[in-house]
Amino acid sequence: MWGNPRTENVTTDVPGNTCRAPSTPKFMRISRILPLSQMREGRPGAATRPQEPGYDQWSLEHHGLIVDKVVEEVKPKVLLELGTYCGYSAVRMGRLLPPGGHLFTIEFNESFAAIAQQIIQLAGLQEKISILKGPTEEIIPQLKKKYEINTVDMVFLDHWKDRYLPDTRLLEESGLLRKGSVLLADNVILPGAPEFLQYIRNHKGFECTHYPSMLEYLPMKDGLEKAVFLG
Ligand SMILES: C[S@@+](CC[C@H](N)C(=O)[O-])C[C@H]1O[C@@H](n2cnc3c(N)ncnc32)[C@H](O)[C@@H]1O
Protein backbone atom coordinates (compact mmCIF):
# COMPACT_ATOMS: atom_id res chain seq x y z
CA MET A 1 0.00 0.00 0.00
CA TRP A 2 2.82 2.40 0.73
CA GLY A 3 4.14 1.83 -2.76
CA ASN A 4 7.72 2.11 -1.63
CA PRO A 5 10.11 -0.30 -3.37
CA ARG A 6 12.27 -0.42 -0.26
CA THR A 7 9.58 -2.32 1.63
CA GLU A 8 7.80 -4.25 -1.07
CA ASN A 9 7.54 -8.03 -0.80
CA VAL A 10 8.81 -8.12 2.76
CA THR A 11 6.89 -10.74 4.71
CA THR A 12 6.46 -10.36 8.43
CA ASP A 13 7.62 -12.93 10.94
CA VAL A 14 5.13 -11.82 13.57
CA PRO A 15 3.43 -14.99 14.84
CA GLY A 16 0.01 -15.37 13.38
CA ASN A 17 0.49 -12.54 10.91
CA THR A 18 0.60 -13.83 7.38
CA CYS A 19 0.09 -10.50 5.61
CA ARG A 20 2.78 -8.82 3.56
CA ALA A 21 4.49 -5.90 5.21
CA PRO A 22 3.65 -2.99 2.91
CA SER A 23 -0.06 -3.65 2.88
CA THR A 24 -0.51 -4.79 6.44
CA PRO A 25 -0.79 -1.60 8.49
CA LYS A 26 -3.14 0.36 6.29
CA PHE A 27 -5.10 -2.76 5.32
CA MET A 28 -5.61 -3.67 8.94
CA ARG A 29 -6.60 -0.12 9.80
CA ILE A 30 -9.36 -0.45 7.28
CA SER A 31 -10.29 -3.85 8.63
CA ARG A 32 -10.85 -2.04 11.91
CA ILE A 33 -13.19 0.34 10.13
CA LEU A 34 -15.01 -2.57 8.53
CA PRO A 35 -17.32 -4.42 8.65
CA LEU A 36 -19.52 -1.52 7.73
CA SER A 37 -22.53 -3.36 9.07
CA GLN A 38 -21.13 -2.83 12.57
CA MET A 39 -20.83 0.93 12.17
CA ARG A 40 -23.61 3.12 13.36
CA GLU A 41 -24.42 5.96 11.05
CA GLY A 42 -23.63 9.37 12.46
CA ARG A 43 -21.29 8.07 15.16
CA PRO A 44 -17.66 8.76 14.23
CA GLY A 45 -16.36 6.75 17.18
CA ALA A 46 -17.88 3.64 15.67
CA ALA A 47 -15.60 4.07 12.67
CA THR A 48 -12.43 4.33 14.69
CA ARG A 49 -12.98 1.86 17.48
CA PRO A 50 -12.08 -1.73 16.76
CA GLN A 51 -14.72 -4.34 17.41
CA GLU A 52 -12.48 -7.29 18.25
CA PRO A 53 -11.31 -8.08 21.77
CA GLY A 54 -7.52 -7.88 22.22
CA TYR A 55 -7.12 -5.36 19.40
CA ASP A 56 -4.36 -3.47 21.18
CA GLN A 57 -2.07 -6.49 21.22
CA TRP A 58 0.64 -4.74 19.19
CA SER A 59 0.00 -1.13 20.29
CA LEU A 60 -2.25 -0.67 17.32
CA GLU A 61 -3.29 2.79 18.35
CA HIS A 62 0.22 4.15 18.76
CA HIS A 63 0.44 6.30 15.61
CA GLY A 64 -3.21 7.20 15.92
CA LEU A 65 -2.79 8.41 19.48
CA ILE A 66 0.06 10.71 18.48
CA VAL A 67 -2.05 12.14 15.66
CA ASP A 68 -4.99 12.58 18.08
CA LYS A 69 -2.75 14.42 20.56
CA VAL A 70 -1.45 16.87 17.95
CA VAL A 71 -4.93 17.57 16.54
CA GLU A 72 -6.21 18.16 20.08
CA GLU A 73 -3.31 20.56 20.78
CA VAL A 74 -3.57 22.51 17.53
CA LYS A 75 -7.40 22.62 17.39
CA PRO A 76 -7.23 23.30 13.64
CA LYS A 77 -10.01 25.25 11.97
CA VAL A 78 -8.46 24.31 8.64
CA LEU A 79 -6.81 20.90 8.53
CA LEU A 80 -5.28 19.54 5.33
CA GLU A 81 -4.51 15.85 4.83
CA LEU A 82 -2.31 14.62 1.99
CA GLY A 83 -3.33 11.02 1.20
CA THR A 84 -6.86 9.91 2.15
CA TYR A 85 -6.76 6.22 1.21
CA CYS A 86 -10.06 4.87 2.56
CA GLY A 87 -10.61 7.59 5.13
CA TYR A 88 -9.37 6.05 8.38
CA SER A 89 -7.22 8.99 9.48
CA ALA A 90 -9.69 11.49 8.02
CA VAL A 91 -12.44 10.13 10.27
CA ARG A 92 -10.04 9.85 13.16
CA MET A 93 -8.97 13.50 12.86
CA GLY A 94 -12.38 14.75 11.75
CA ARG A 95 -14.00 13.62 14.98
CA LEU A 96 -11.55 15.80 16.95
CA LEU A 97 -12.02 19.03 14.98
CA PRO A 98 -13.16 22.04 17.00
CA PRO A 99 -16.56 23.58 16.21
CA GLY A 100 -16.38 25.19 12.78
CA GLY A 101 -13.27 23.21 11.88
CA HIS A 102 -12.95 21.56 8.47
CA LEU A 103 -10.71 18.86 7.05
CA PHE A 104 -9.72 18.87 3.38
CA THR A 105 -8.17 15.57 2.35
CA ILE A 106 -6.47 15.02 -1.01
CA GLU A 107 -6.52 11.67 -2.83
CA PHE A 108 -5.64 10.91 -6.45
CA ASN A 109 -7.03 7.38 -6.58
CA GLU A 110 -10.70 7.64 -7.52
CA SER A 111 -11.65 4.23 -6.11
CA PHE A 112 -10.11 5.01 -2.73
CA ALA A 113 -11.76 8.42 -2.72
CA ALA A 114 -15.16 6.82 -3.38
CA ILE A 115 -14.73 4.35 -0.51
CA ALA A 116 -13.52 7.13 1.79
CA GLN A 117 -16.59 9.19 0.93
CA GLN A 118 -18.82 6.34 2.11
CA ILE A 119 -16.80 5.84 5.29
CA ILE A 120 -17.01 9.56 6.06
CA GLN A 121 -20.76 9.50 5.41
CA LEU A 122 -21.23 6.51 7.70
CA ALA A 123 -19.27 8.30 10.39
CA GLY A 124 -21.59 11.30 10.05
CA LEU A 125 -18.70 13.63 9.25
CA GLN A 126 -19.63 14.67 5.70
CA GLU A 127 -20.21 18.29 6.77
CA LYS A 128 -16.73 18.49 8.28
CA ILE A 129 -14.63 16.61 5.74
CA SER A 130 -14.18 17.30 2.02
CA ILE A 131 -12.28 14.97 -0.27
CA LEU A 132 -10.39 16.81 -3.00
CA LYS A 133 -9.73 14.41 -5.85
CA GLY A 134 -6.46 14.72 -7.71
CA PRO A 135 -2.71 14.80 -7.19
CA THR A 136 -1.41 16.98 -4.37
CA GLU A 137 1.00 18.72 -6.74
CA GLU A 138 -2.00 20.00 -8.75
CA ILE A 139 -4.41 20.69 -5.91
CA ILE A 140 -2.14 22.47 -3.41
CA PRO A 141 -1.54 25.46 -5.73
CA GLN A 142 -5.34 25.70 -6.27
CA LEU A 143 -6.28 25.72 -2.58
CA LYS A 144 -6.39 29.51 -2.20
CA LYS A 145 -8.40 30.44 -5.27
CA LYS A 146 -10.51 27.37 -5.99
CA TYR A 147 -11.21 26.24 -2.42
CA GLU A 148 -10.95 29.66 -0.71
CA ILE A 149 -8.41 28.47 1.83
CA ASN A 150 -6.29 31.36 3.02
CA THR A 151 -3.87 29.49 5.28
CA VAL A 152 -3.87 26.05 6.90
CA ASP A 153 -3.58 25.47 10.65
CA MET A 154 -2.33 21.92 10.31
CA VAL A 155 -1.22 19.54 7.56
CA PHE A 156 -1.08 15.76 7.98
CA LEU A 157 1.34 14.30 5.42
CA ASP A 158 0.57 10.65 4.76
CA HIS A 159 0.84 10.16 1.01
CA TRP A 160 3.79 8.85 -0.99
CA LYS A 161 6.91 9.64 0.97
CA ASP A 162 8.84 11.10 -1.98
CA ARG A 163 6.17 13.83 -2.19
CA TYR A 164 6.68 15.03 1.42
CA LEU A 165 9.49 17.42 0.51
CA PRO A 166 8.16 18.85 -2.78
CA ASP A 167 4.68 19.30 -1.28
CA THR A 168 6.11 21.05 1.80
CA ARG A 169 7.89 23.45 -0.54
CA LEU A 170 4.68 23.89 -2.52
CA LEU A 171 2.78 24.76 0.66
CA GLU A 172 5.41 27.39 1.48
CA GLU A 173 5.51 28.81 -2.06
CA SER A 174 1.72 28.93 -2.26
CA GLY A 175 1.61 31.06 0.92
CA LEU A 176 -0.56 28.52 2.71
CA LEU A 177 1.53 28.40 5.88
CA ARG A 178 1.12 31.05 8.58
CA LYS A 179 3.08 31.54 11.78
CA GLY A 180 2.15 28.54 13.94
CA SER A 181 0.95 26.23 11.16
CA VAL A 182 1.82 22.66 12.11
CA LEU A 183 3.01 19.95 9.73
CA LEU A 184 2.71 16.39 11.01
CA ALA A 185 4.40 13.80 8.80
CA ASP A 186 3.72 10.08 9.28
CA ASN A 187 6.16 7.18 8.67
CA VAL A 188 9.23 9.39 8.37
CA ILE A 189 11.48 6.49 9.43
CA LEU A 190 9.74 3.54 7.78
CA PRO A 191 9.34 3.57 4.79
CA GLY A 192 11.07 6.88 5.53
CA ALA A 193 11.27 10.38 4.15
CA PRO A 194 14.98 11.25 4.59
CA GLU A 195 15.06 14.22 2.20
CA PHE A 196 12.06 15.75 3.94
CA LEU A 197 13.61 15.25 7.40
CA GLN A 198 16.91 16.78 6.33
CA TYR A 199 15.17 19.79 4.81
CA ILE A 200 12.76 20.50 7.62
CA ARG A 201 15.24 19.97 10.47
CA ASN A 202 17.77 22.35 8.87
CA HIS A 203 15.21 24.99 7.96
CA LYS A 204 15.34 27.99 10.30
CA GLY A 205 11.66 28.62 9.67
CA PHE A 206 10.53 25.36 11.29
CA GLU A 207 10.76 24.03 14.83
CA CYS A 208 10.75 20.23 14.77
CA THR A 209 9.80 17.54 17.26
CA HIS A 210 10.18 13.83 16.59
CA TYR A 211 7.66 11.34 17.98
CA PRO A 212 9.19 7.85 17.90
CA SER A 213 6.72 5.02 17.57
CA MET A 214 6.55 1.34 16.83
CA LEU A 215 5.18 0.46 13.44
CA GLU A 216 1.64 -0.77 13.80
CA TYR A 217 1.37 -4.57 13.72
CA LEU A 218 5.14 -5.02 13.25
CA PRO A 219 7.89 -4.84 15.86
CA MET A 220 9.77 -2.17 13.90
CA LYS A 221 10.63 1.43 14.74
CA ASP A 222 8.98 4.30 12.96
CA GLY A 223 8.17 7.88 13.85
CA LEU A 224 6.21 11.01 13.11
CA GLU A 225 7.79 14.43 12.67
CA LYS A 226 6.02 17.57 13.82
CA ALA A 227 7.23 20.83 12.33
CA VAL A 228 5.84 24.17 13.48
CA PHE A 229 6.21 26.98 10.94
CA LEU A 230 7.76 30.01 12.64
CA GLY A 231 6.74 32.49 9.97
C1 LIG B 1 -0.66 5.71 3.27
S1 LIG B 1 -2.11 5.99 2.34
C2 LIG B 1 -3.01 7.17 3.31
C3 LIG B 1 -3.59 6.58 4.55
C4 LIG B 1 -4.56 7.46 5.28
N1 LIG B 1 -3.99 8.77 5.58
C5 LIG B 1 -4.95 6.78 6.57
O1 LIG B 1 -4.16 6.79 7.55
O2 LIG B 1 -6.05 6.22 6.60
C6 LIG B 1 -1.48 7.00 1.06
C7 LIG B 1 -2.54 7.48 0.09
O3 LIG B 1 -2.03 8.61 -0.58
C8 LIG B 1 -2.45 8.58 -1.93
N2 LIG B 1 -1.47 9.40 -2.66
C9 LIG B 1 -0.15 9.16 -2.80
N3 LIG B 1 0.46 10.16 -3.43
C10 LIG B 1 -0.49 11.08 -3.71
C11 LIG B 1 -0.48 12.34 -4.37
N4 LIG B 1 0.66 12.88 -4.83
N5 LIG B 1 -1.64 12.99 -4.50
C12 LIG B 1 -2.80 12.47 -4.01
N6 LIG B 1 -2.87 11.28 -3.36
C13 LIG B 1 -1.73 10.60 -3.21
C14 LIG B 1 -2.45 7.11 -2.30
O4 LIG B 1 -3.32 6.83 -3.38
C15 LIG B 1 -2.92 6.48 -0.99
O5 LIG B 1 -4.31 6.29 -0.98
Image (cartoon, rainbow, N blue to C red):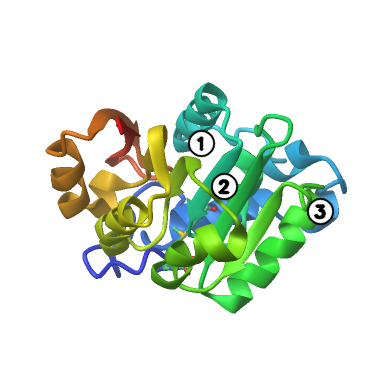
Which residue is labeled 1 in the image?
64
Horizontal side of 146 relative to 115 (left or right) equals: left
Which quadrant is the N terminus positioned in? bottom left
Which quadrant is the C terminus positioned in? top left
Which residue is labeled 3 in the image?
122
Residue 90: image location, x then y, percent: 60, 49
Horizontal side of 165 relative to 74 (left or right) equals: left
**Type of residue at label 1?**
Gly
Q: How many marks?
A: 3
Q: Quadrant of residue 182?
A: top left
Kind of element beneath mark 2: helix
Kind of element beneath mark 3: helix
Question: Considering depth in this image, is 44 or 219 the residue closer to the camera?
Answer: 44
- Disc marking residue 166: none
Name the residue: 72% across, 36% down.
100
Query: Is 196 placed above or below 18 here?
Result: above
Visible in this render: residue 57?
Answer: no
